[in-house]
Image (cartoon, rainbow, N blue to C red):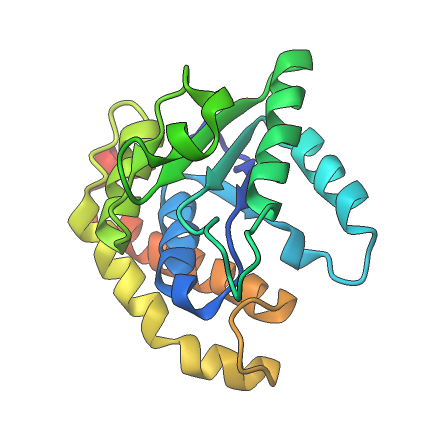
Amino acid sequence: MPGSKKPEPVFLNIPYDSAFEDLYVAYIVGLTRLGLNVTATLAHPNQDRLAKIIELIERCSLSIHDLSRIEASHGIPRFNMPLELGIALYRSAKAKHQVYVFESKAFRAQRSTSDINKMDPRIHNGTPKGVMSSLLNLFRPAGNPITVPEMLRSYKAVKAKLPELRKNAGSKSVFEKAVFEDLKLAALVESEKLKSSKPASLRN
């Protein structure tokens, strides 16, 4: 769990589209600050996608599934996120794997994906602050006074670097392997800055 010397890997299942960019950055920054190592399928391009999804989920004991944008896009519903959630739920029934569902609106996930009615989705209201608050309430290490405001400061610092990260990767999209890896590094740098600014007894 968070706080271990080696960051625990967490599988992140989100939509890869520009409207989700802010929340994507918030997930990476928030999870990194909480001592987790984010992994996602976009870090493994040009591979058998379904096989890679299964492999990544099997490597992780945690997975986060954001169902806030499964509505129809250009007339076609998005099934990728529910599909990956289904794989993770199957994994959780066979081995140690904790599944967390995130949504932007209360009760919508239970209606759109009724088989998860016994789960309690985390509601982020479609905002980076909502994502940070939900992550903190799930994964904050015991005895570590991490706060949402400091996580948001890190988020703003990392988001300000996006134009440079896109330029360095030669990409207009943040949903590319190179940008993903650089985002994780930038999030780690900001996390270490916050740690170093605290008294030694409060660092994690």
**Residue at the image point whose x is 62% and y is 70% from the top:** 178
Above or below residue 186? Residue 167 is below
Where residue 78 appears, as percent x and y from the top left, is 56, 51
Q: Nearer the viewer, residue 83 or 140?
A: 83
- Give the mark count: 0
Above or below residue 136? Residue 28 is below
**Residue at the image point whose x is 39% and y is 30% from the top:** 111
Residue extending farthest to the left is 149
Where residue 179 appears, as percent x and y from the top left, is 56, 70
The part of the image, by quadrant, that contains residue 143 is top left
**Residue at the image point whose x is 49% and y is 56% from the top:** 72
Above or below residue 191? Residue 181 is below
Instruction: Determine whether, in the image, residue 83 is placed left or right of residue 173.
Output: right
**Residue at the image point whose x is 58% and y is 62% from the top:** 181
The answer to whether residue 187 shows anywhere in this view is: yes
Q: Nearer the viewer, residue 155 or 64?
A: 64
Which quadrant would the C terminus be assigned to in this image? top left
Instruction: Determine whether, in the image, residue 107 is placed left or right of residue 75.
Output: left
